Structures are given as structure tokens and as C-alpha cells.
Amino acid sequence: MPRAGARRSRAGGTSAGRDLERYGAKRRFEKTPEPPPRQRRSTTGRLFVVQKHRATQLHYDFRLEGSGVLKSWSVPKGPSLDPAVKRLAVAVEDHPVDYASFEGIIPEGEYGGGTVMLWDRGTYRLDKGTDLATALRRGEVVFTLLGRKLKGGWSLVRLRGRSWLLIKRRDRSASSRDVTLTAPNSVLTRRTLARIAAAEGGDVRKAASGDPRKNARRS
Ligand code: MN
């Protein structure tokens, strides 16, 4: 039964229900261990999560909680701590808040088939405005991350359509070090992609191609 509140948020272009329908329509929950499309708020209402995902291509899924869902972007190269480096972030379908604790295998042949690692997780706060939905509509989200790997000020700025840029702001947590290489493993279990795949029956060789190569350095 439609509720008046849902219709109001739809008019504002932020209908979470509509976007979890997209999440649900892409997945077969009898095949994938991913959480079902349930809308709910976390305890803080301010979760952020970054999942490293070796699907067809390696990418990092960046998610901010708002309106009972995780607003989500796919970042092909992952976040950079260097404020001079702007990383493309392509907006994708909203994910359920329950996705913030998902690490494991999506079966090959299913949508997003491959290995998913919980790469970083924490909370965020908005530094400009008070409402994520409004910031998204305006195409500029200015926020602070309180994660294990990602900290301090960040911005998401819309270029056009679904294309955004994820940019580190200048502060003492900015750095030229490549955090995707210096901190490549799960923030939850410290596992590599290959170990997650091995433990959970995934494609280990495919997963390992998303892990940094230990023997890449030659002296
Ligand atoms: Mn993904």
C-alpha cells in the first residue's frame, strides 16, 4: 500500500523504495548470498562502507547511508588520499543498509558475480548542509569520513548524469601514499580477495588478480 511519505520523497527524486526495487530486480536471492532489498536505518544513520569487488573488473563500491538505504557509486580505481587526484565514481543502484556487513562470494553468472571484500567501514558526517538527499540533488556532497583507512574531508561532485568525482579534501589525513596498495585487505577479517574466495568457494585465481602482487617489486 503506497504511503503519503513515500510519494513525497518520490516527488523529491529521492525515493529509496524505487531504487531498492532496482537492486532487487537485478538479483536472484535464491542464488546470491547478498542481503534482500529491505529498507532500514542503521543505529547511527550515518554508515559509510567501501567494498572492494572483483567482478568483471576490479572496482571499489563506495556507499553512504541516507533515507534508509546505502547510496552507492562504483569507483574503478578506488579512492585516492591525494587531493590532486580526482577519481571517477559512477552512481549505481541504492543498496540495502544490510549490505554494509556483506563480504563473500556472488556466484559466477549472477549479477556482479565475483568476490566482495569489506575494504573499509565507519561513519560519516555531512560538512555542508544537513541532508544527503538534498546534497545529492545539488550534485555536491561534502563530508568527513571516520573509517579505519579513509578519514578526514572528502567531496563527491557530479560531472554529468551518473558520473561523479570522488576527491580527497586537503587536511592532515591527505597523503600521496596509495592506500589501495598499502592497505589492500579486509577491514573486517584482514583477508585478501584470494583468501575470501578460497574460504567461500569462489574463483580464487580471478579473485587473486585483484590483490596486489607480492613479487611485483624487483631489486
Ligand atoms: Mn560492485
Image: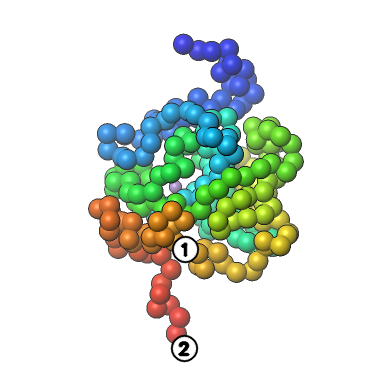
Residue pictured at 65% horizontal, 35% vertical: 132
Please tell me which residue is depicted at 53% across the width and 58% down the height of the picture.
77
Query: Mark 1 highlights which residue?
Result: 184
Q: Quadrant of residue 217?
A: bottom left
Where is residue 84 drawn, in percent x and y? Answer: 69, 62
Q: Residue 134 falls in which quadrant of the image?
A: top right
| Residue 72 position (above or below residue 17) | below
Would residue 125 be found to the left or right of residue 112 on screen?
right
Query: Which amino acid type corresponds to the residue marked 2 in the rendered image?
Result: Ser
Amino acid type shown at disc 1: Pro
Front: mark 2 or 1: 1
Neighbour class for label 1 at 10 Å: few (<14), some, many (≥20)? many
Q: Earlier in the sequence, mark 2 or mark 1?
A: 1
Secondary structure under tag 2 reads loop
Q: Secondary structure at mark 1?
A: loop
x, y percent for residue 44: 57, 37
Q: Which residue is mark 2?
A: 219
Q: Position of residue 7 (x, y in %)?
A: 58, 16
Q: How many marks?
A: 2
Residue 175 quadrant? bottom right
Callout 2: few (<14), some (14-19), or many (20+) C-alpha neighbours within 10 Å?
A: few
Residue placed most toward the observer, 2 or 163: 2
